[in-house]
Image (spheres, grey):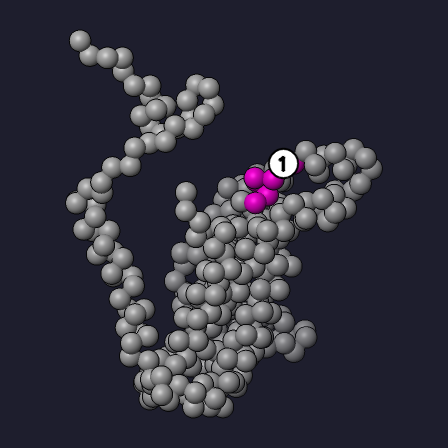
Amino acid sequence: MTGPKQPVAARSGRGGPDGTRVRAVRRGVPVPLLVPGLLAMAFLLVPLLALLVRAPWRSLPSQLTSTEVWQALQLSLVSATAATAVALVLGVPLAWLLARAEFPGRGLVRALVTLPLVLPPVVGGVALLLALGRNGVVGQWLDAWFGITLPFTTAGVVIAEAFVAMPFLVISVEGTLRAADPRYEEAATTLGASRFTAFRRVTLPLIAPGIAAGAVLAWARALGEFGATITFAGNFPGRTQTMPLAVYLALQNDPEAAVALSLILLAVSVAVLAGLRDRWMTGA
């Protein structure tokens, strides 16, 4: 006769009836999963390792101290920071509306807000030109009324980067808001605080980690933006040429400079992942 069947909770590794966690027995990795997994790891890591192996380490200091590199680096840092500030000012209230407010078509609005995540960046640049160009839907009035021309300017770089980076912030903050307990806000309003005061004094401190993580992601995305920037703002050294654009240009004329610039962007990406290690890089 066979013994009693093992409880489902014990077999699955979930908590038992008494609330204690039952550890699942770790088994060997199946070969049909191990081989594709290792191939995927190699596919993702080998290009990065090749960048490090083929880097011109001896000439790297001179490459990184050139005027063109510093101009591109300075413009990238300034524009990415400004784009992140725009994303914070506009994206946090938008995330609150999506997470807390009830209005018709909220699901559609959420889908449209996240559309730049999957939209080809070049298409985003074309859309910005049609909207904010000198003859655009909105840009023609900006030019006629205020004399403001955004395409092919540094401000255009900031707008293009904010357009592609803001959804990262909105998704992060909205997820944090949905996880936060709304009863704290309700308690503050019952004590006489306005909705905005409750948001400023209660909600913001609660969701500060989510805002910080979203801001870091938005900044990193803005720093690496290429397609929308070159389409909407162009590639003018000292004015609109950011680091990714400088890499693209240097790859045609000076491959060693392109590798040096790529190393800077790689270092920034690693730093961003290190900053978000508590969110994404902790094991279960």
Q: Position of residue 142 (x, y in %)?
A: 63, 72
Left or right side of 191 for 59: left
Q: Position of residue 187 (x, y in %)?
A: 74, 34
- Taking the spot 39% from the left edge, 62% from the top edge, the residue there is 120
Few, some or many residues within 10 Å of mark 1 (<14, 14–19, 20+): few
Residue 89 % position (x, y): 65, 59
Residue 198 located left or right of residue 99: right
Using residue 40 as the reference point, say whether residue 242 is left or right of it. Answer: right
Provide the residue span drawn in magenta: 176-182
Q: Is residue 210 above or below residue 102?
A: below
269 up-or-down from 27: above or below: below
Q: Is residue 95 visible?
A: yes
Q: Quadrant of the N terminus?
A: top left
Q: What residue is disc 1 on?
A: 181
Residue furthest toward the top?
1
Does residue 181 show up magenta in the picture? yes
**Which amino acid does the dot numbered 1 rest on?**
Asp
**Looking at the image, is 45 positioned above or below residue 241?**
above
Between 19 and 192, the one lying in front of the other is 19
Magenta stretch contains residue 130? no
* Residue 125 can be seen in this image: no
Q: Could you say which quadrant of the image residue 105 lies in?
A: top right
Quarter of the image where the C terminus is located? top left
The residue drawn where x is 39% and y is 76% is 262
